[in-house]
Image (tube, rainbow, N blue to C red):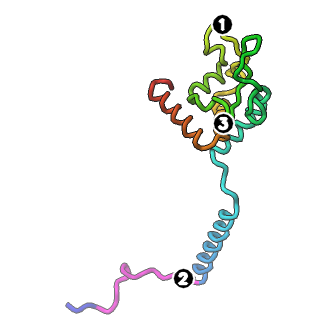
Amino acid sequence: MAKSGKRSRAKQRPRTRHPALTVAALGLLGLGAAVAGFAFWRSPPPESDTEAMIALGRQVYEANCAACHGVNLEGQPNWRQRRADGTLPAPPHDAAGHTWHHPDQQLFAVTKYGVAALAGPGYKSDMPGFGTTLSDAEIRAVLEYIKSTWPEEIRRRQAQATLRARTQGGG
């Protein structure tokens, strides 16, 4: 049986009735993509969750912590020497202090409940608990802000202390 030179309609490719409209539509799509791409690359990258948390932490720190611990996290003078009333001055939270020696879980608890609540009866401290003043998220933000000011090596060592505390059942 000989094949016919004509293809059946089912196998034929559809033809565009208005090729000029198709070209114009594709051109507009391309132009739109180019404009969107240009706008994307020219705009600054969005703030990360960590950057937003650090910014919030700085605001909360300045409003609630800086009066005792210093605007620059420097703490009070002679912070290692007890005063006549038995309390210690507020320690620095910068790299010169001891804050980074403690795991996140302990720093969170001290901030939320206060030193005296964790140290037990008879321990004197001026560090109040902020659990009724600050939300847990605000406390975590303050800690992230403080940690963001430390040199990389100190952040790494503090992160190791936090991991050790977690693996030993401390949080």
Residue under numbered circle 3: 95
Which sits earlier in the primary sequence, circle 3 or circle 2? 2
Q: Nearer the viewer, mark 1 or mark 2?
A: 1
Residue under numbered circle 1: 122
Q: Position of residue 59 (x, y in %)?
A: 75, 36
The residue that appears at 53% across and 31% down in the rendered structure is: 162
Magenta segment includes 18? yes
Magenta segment includes 134? no
Q: Callout 2, which amino acid?
A: Arg
The residue that appears at 54% across and 37% down in the rendered structure is: 157
Residue under numbered circle 2: 17
Cβ–Cβ under 8 Å for marks 3 and 2 = no
Q: In terms of image quadrants, where is residue 120?
A: top right
Q: Position of residue 153 (x, y in %)?
A: 57, 42
In-front residue for pair 145/12: 145
Q: Position of residue 169 (x, y in %)?
A: 46, 24
Q: Secondary structure at mark 2?
A: loop
Which sits earlier in the primary sequence, circle 1 or circle 3? 3
Q: In terms of image quadrants, where is residue 76?
A: top right
Q: Position of residue 108 (x, y in %)?
A: 61, 26
The residue that appears at 56% across and 35% down in the rendered structure is: 158
Q: Nearer the viewer, mark 3 or mark 2?
A: 3
Q: Is 70 positioned to the left or the right of 27 in the image? A: right
Q: In the image, which residues are magenta?
A: 4-19
Cβ–Cβ under 8 Å for marks 1 and 3 = no
Between the C-alphas of marks 1 and 3, the distance is 30 Å
Q: Callout 1, which amino acid?
A: Gly
Q: In terms of image quadrants, where is residue 122?
A: top right
Between the C-alphas of marks 1 and 2, the distance is 91 Å
